[in-house]
Image (cartoon, grey):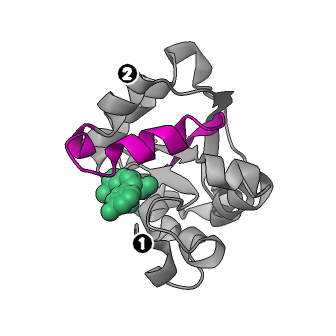
Amino acid sequence: MSENFEKTLVLIKPDAIQRSLVGDIIQRFERKGLKLLGLKMMSLDEAVLREHYAHLVDKPFFAGLAKFMKSTPVVAMCWEGVEAVAAVRLIAGITKAREADAGTIRGDFAMSVSCNVIHASDTTENAEIEVKRFFNSDEIYDYDKTEYLHIYADDER
Ligand code: IDP
Ligand code: MG
């Protein structure tokens, strides 16, 4: 397999759980041609949120963000593909959902800066850390996706 294959972490946030958008969101990633390696529902506690949003803990909105992220379980997913980290960020759209491009998940499904339906890893370095933060190694599955024959050209695989 080419070294350009990357794993990335996506969380479906509590607003999307409440709004019954889980299936729609997963479908976006499946249709794109990404491969699902891991999927589970989990509740996040303050400790993991302080780690995951370490770049935001000093912001005035952090307490509200943590409360929101603890308000329901989230769906954690690991997706794989060639340059998947950037591809998933493109599908996700920008943070401020009401300004996100139409066609992106945030652009199509959300209006808020905070309640923006998904988290997606922002760099390959963070993706590696985040997949390990939310998944044990035996929860990441290795299998042949036969669709890859049609999703990528021979020299991309
Ligand atoms: P990202 O999710 O697009 O990577 P980050 O800047 O890493 O954006 O912020 C993480 C999350 O924190 C956002 O998705 C959003 O839920 C929340 N957030 C970011 N900025 C604000 C803000 O100004 N007000 C409230 N919540 C925010
Ligand atoms: Mg971020």
Q: Secondary structure at mark 2?
A: helix
Mark 1: amino acid: Lys
Q: Does 35 appear in magenta?
A: no
Residue 134, image x and y in percent?
A: 49, 26
Residue sitting nearer the eye, 140 or 145 = 140
- Residue at screen point 44% across, 32% down: 131
- Residue at screen point 57% across, 14% down: 138
Q: Dot 2: within a 10 Å radius of its alpha carbon, few (fewer than 14), some, or many (20 or more) residues?
A: few
- Residues at discs 1 and 2 in contact (Cβ within 8 Å): no
Q: Is residue 92 above or below residue 45?
A: below
Residue 74, image x and y in percent?
A: 62, 38
State whether residue 82 appears in this view: no
On the image, which quarter does residue 129 sit in?
Answer: top left
Q: Which residues are magenta?
A: 54-82
Q: Secondary structure at mark 1?
A: loop
157 sits left or right of 55 in the view: right
On the image, which quarter does residue 30 sit in?
Answer: bottom right
Residue 81, image x and y in percent?
A: 50, 51
On the image, which quarter does residue 70 sit in?
Answer: top right
> In the rendered image, which residue does mark 2 sit on?
47
Residue sitting nearer the eye, 95 or 139 = 95
- Residue at screen point 45% across, 63% down: 87
Label 1, ligand 1: CB separation under 8 Å = yes
Assign ligand 1 to one image quadrant.
bottom left
Residue sitting nearer the eye, 23 or 6 = 23
- Residue at screen point 37% across, 41% down: 63
47 sits left or right of 79 in the view: left
Q: Dot 1: within a 10 Å radius of its alpha carbon, few (fewer than 14), some, or many (20 or more) residues?
A: some
Please tell me the numbered disc located at residue 96.
1
Q: Does 74 appear in magenta?
A: yes
Residue 145, image x and y in percent?
A: 69, 43
